[in-house]
Amino acid sequence: MVAIFVIIGLIAVLALCAFFGGSMGRYAVKRILLMFLTLFIIMTICFILIKLLPLPLIKSINKDVELQRAKYEQRGYYKPIMVQYFNFWKNVITEWNWGMGEQLYTDRPVWPVMMQKLPYTVLVNLYSILIAIPIGLAFGIYAALKKNKWQDNVISTAVMIFTSVPSYVYAFLVQYFLCTKLRWFPLTVLSQDEAALFSWPMFVSMVPAMLSLGFGVTAGLTRYTRAELSEVLTGDYMLLARTKGLTKAQAISRHAMRNAMVVILPMIIGEFIGILGGSLIIERIFSIPGIGNVFVDAISVKDYNFFMAETFFYTLIGLASGILTDISYGFIDPRIRMGSKK
Amino acid sequence: MENRTIDQLQQIPAEKFQFVQQDQRISDAKLETKRIGYFGDVWRRFKHDKSALVAFILIIILLLFSIIVPLFSYTNVQFREENYAFVLPKISLFKGSGFWDGTKTIDSQYQGSYDYYRALGLESGMSPIVGEVKTSTDSDGTTRYAFRVDTYYEPGYEIKVLPANEYEALLAYQKETGNQIFFPVPKTYSINFNGFKKGNIWYKLDVTEVGADGTVIDYEKDFRDNPTSAAAKKAYTSALENTSGKAVLDENGNVIPNYLRTTEPVDDTLPEDKWRFPKDYYPEDANRIAGDDGTYVYALKVQGGYRVRINIYNEYVKRYQHEPSFIFGTNVYGQDIFACLAYGGRLSFILAISVSLINFIIGACYGAIEGYYGGAVDMVMERISDVLGYMPFIVVATLFKLHLQEKVGPIWSLLFAFILTGWIGMASRVRMQFYRFKGHEYVLAARTLGAPDRRLIMKHIFPNSLGTIITGSILVIPGVIFSESMLSYLNIINLETSGMTSIGTMLSNGQPYLSTHPHIILFPALFISILEISFNLFGNGLRDAFNPSLRGAEN
C-alpha cells in the first residue's frame, strides 16, 4: 500500500510544479508525463513479447518438470495474457512487486535483489565519472587555449583514438598491463564477503574498472570542451575583456568558461545518469556484482521476471538522462526559451 | 604616374588610336577547364585531409583482408586441431629471429621438464628447444633451466588407435615420401601421465624417490622384486603417473629409449597384466627409424584397428599438404586466428553495410515524409519514432533473438534488431534537413509550376542533404560492428551454433587466457580498434569534405 501513497504524492508534486513553476515548470511536467507514457508503452510491448515466449521447463536430474509446471501454474504464468497484464500492473503499482526470480536467484523477490546489486554499479560509475570529469575538463581547456599548436594536436589525436577504441579493449589492456604484468590491482572486484562497500581495499580493486570506463568519458568531454571553449574564445566580448584590463586567466575564468559551461554542464549531468546504462561489458570483465551482470545472466538463463525489471530500469535511465539534460539546459542558459520545441 | 599637362594630352597623334576588334565577332569563349561536378569537388576537398585519406586506405585494406583471405586460406572456421591449440603466431620469414616465429621463453624449469623437452626432438630431429639453455642454481642446490621453445614442435607425438584403412593410407604415404609418421611405441604407452603427453614419454623414467630420512626408494626395483604384490604395483604405477619427467641417463648423459621390443614377449616390468606384450605386432610393414635393431614395435593390433604412435607434425603435413604455421597463432580450440578473423570480419562488414543501407532507405523515406508534410503527420510520426528510440538496444536484440532464433537463425534476427531502431537517427537528420530547405524559393517556384510532391521531394529538396546523409550512413558502420561484437562477447547472440564466428566471439574465447596467452585477444582487439579509428577519421574527413562550413565545429 505504500506504493499508492507514493504515487499520489508524485501526482501532487507534479501538479504543484505545473501551477507555480511558470513556463519552465510546465515544460518539465510535460516532459515527465511524456516519460511515463513512453515507459508504459515500452513496458507493454516488452511484456507482451515476453509472455508470448514458451516458459522454460528444464529437464535435469535435480529439477522435476512436473514440479516446475505446478509452480508456474500457481504463480499465474499460464493464465491468459491480458489477465497477467492486469496482475502485473496491479502488483507493480500497489506493492512494487516485480515477481520472483525463476531461474536466477530462484524464489527470491526480484526488486530487492536488484537493489542489493545496485550500489556496486552506481559506485563504479560514480567513481569513474568523478575522476574523468575534472581530467576531461582540464585537458579540454588546455587544448582550447593552445589551439592548433602541437599540444592541441597531440591531445586531439589522443582524443580521436580514445573515443574510437571500444571500451572493452581498454579493459583488456588495463587488465593485462596493470593487473597481470605489474600486479598493482587485483584482477576482479572484491565481493561483499571480502570487503565492505566503502572500504579502501574495495576502492583499490575497483580502480581498473574505473579506468576502463573513464577513458571514454574523458575523451568525449575533452573533445566537447575544446570545441565549445574555442568557439567562445573567438567572441568579441573576450577582446573587450582583455582591453578592459583583465588578465588572460581572469577573462577566461569569468567570461569564457561560463558561456562554454552552458553547453557542457547539461552534458555532464546527463552523463551521470546515462553512464549507468553502458557498463555491461566492464561488469562482465571485472566480475562486478552489479545490475549489468544480472541482466546478462537473466538473458542467458531466460529468467523473464528479471528481464522485465531490468528493462524498466534501463529505459528509465535513458529517459531520465534525456530529461535531466534538457531541463538543466533550460536552467543554466537564460537565453533559451522553453517553449514546445525541444 | 608622370604628370602630363593638358596640352600634351591633346597632342596625341591620331595613328595611335586603333580599333581593337571592329571586324571580329565577340562571343563567349569555351571553358578551358573540365567540369568536375559535385562529387569531384567533394573528392578534391577530401584529399586535403591526410589523416582521412590514410584512414580510407586502412579501411580498404581491412576490407580486402576480409574478402581475400577466406578465398585462399586452407583453414576456415570449422578447422580445429586440438593438438595445435595455443601455438604462438609464426611467420616463416622471421624464422630464427625470436620475434613472431612461434617460440616462447620458459624459465625456472626443473630437471624433469628439461629432460622431457630435450628428449622430444631426439627421434625425429624436430627439437623444440631453440637456442641455448641457461642454467641457474636455486638456494637449495637444485638446478633450474631456462630456454626458448618452438611451440610448433611442442605437441610431439600422439598415441592413438587408427582404423585399418587409415593405417594403411598413412603407411603408404610414409613409404612414398619418406616422412616418418610412425615411431616406435614405448612400454609405458597406456599410462596416463599427470601433465605430460604419453606419446612423448618414450625414454626410461627415473622412478626413484629420496625419502625424508635420506634413503632412496626405487619403485621399479621394488616391483621387480615382488611382481605379485599389489601394493608394489600400485606404488610403481603411481610413481610413473606422477613423474616429473626426469630421465635415467646412460654413461654419455643421453636418455635411454624405453620401447616395446619383439624380443621380449613377456615383459613383466609393466605393472599391469594387460600390459604384457600383446600377441600381434607388425614390425615388417613400418619403415624403421635410425638406430632400430629390428626389434622395435611400430603398431599393435587392437580391436578396431591398430594402436600407433604418430608424429603429429608429419601427420598434419600429410593431411593438409601445408606445414603448420599460423600467422596469428591458434586459440584454445586450435582454430586458426588469422582465418577466423577474416571470416569474422567478413560477417561484420556484410552485416554492417546491409544495416547501413537498409536504415538509410527506411530513414530517408520516413524523414522525408515527416519533414515535407509537417503538421499532424509530423507529430504522430515523431511520437512513434520517439517511443521506439527509447527502447534499450540490448532489450530489442534479446527479444528478437528469443523469438526468431529457431526460425531464421541468429544472423537474421540480429539484422532485424538493428533495423528496428537504427533508422531513427537517419530519419531525424533527414527531417531536419527538410525543414531547412523546405521554405526556399526554388521549391515554391517549382510548386507553382505544377510539380507534384514526389518530384519536389526527390529532385529539389532531398539532394541538399546528400552530404549529411552519406556521412551519417558511413558512421553507422562502426557502431553496428561495435554493438554486434558487444552482443556476441556477452553471449547474448551465439553465432557458433551456426558455424560462424565473429570478432566478439573471438574476444570472449580469448578472455580467460589473457594472462597466459595474450595473443588470442590481441589480434581481434587490434582489428576492431583500427577499424573504429579509421572509420571515425574517415567519417570526419567526409563530413568536412561535404560541408566545409562545418569544419571545426565538432573537432
Image (spheres, grey):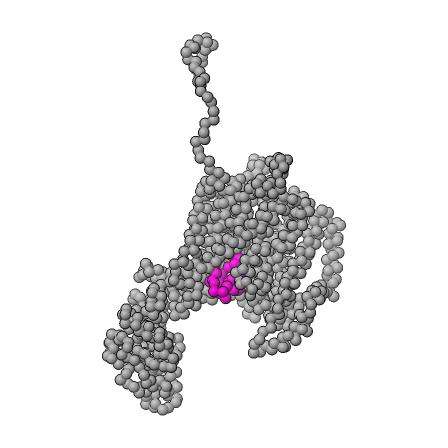
x then y, percent, for residue A258: 60, 44
Chief secondary structure of the magenta span?
Answer: helix
x then y, percent, for residue B214: 34, 83
Q: Which contiguous range is marked in magenta?
A: B481-506
* Quarter location, residue B292: bottom left
Q: Is residue B131 visible?
A: yes
Front residue of B274 and B110:
B274
Front residue of B337 and A175:
B337
Q: Is residue A250 visible?
A: no
User: What residue lies at 41% left-to-right and 13% top-to-bottom?
Assistant: B16
User: What residue lies at 38% left-to-right and 68% top-to-bottom?
Assistant: B84
In this view, A310 is above or below B243: above
x then y, percent, for residue A14: 73, 54
- Taking the magenta stretch, the answer to whether it contains residue B500 is yes
Specify the quadrant that holds the N terminus of chain A: bottom right
User: What residue lies at 62% left-to-right and 45% top-to-bottom?
Assistant: B371
* Quarter location, residue B259: bottom left
Front residue of A77 and A142:
A77
- Taking the magenta stretch, the answer to whether it contains residue B435 is no
Q: How many numbered discs? A: 0
| Position of residue B131 in the picture relative to residue A272 (left or right) | left
User: What residue lies at 43% left-to-right and 47% top-to-bottom?
Assistant: B54
x then y, percent, for residue A43: 66, 60
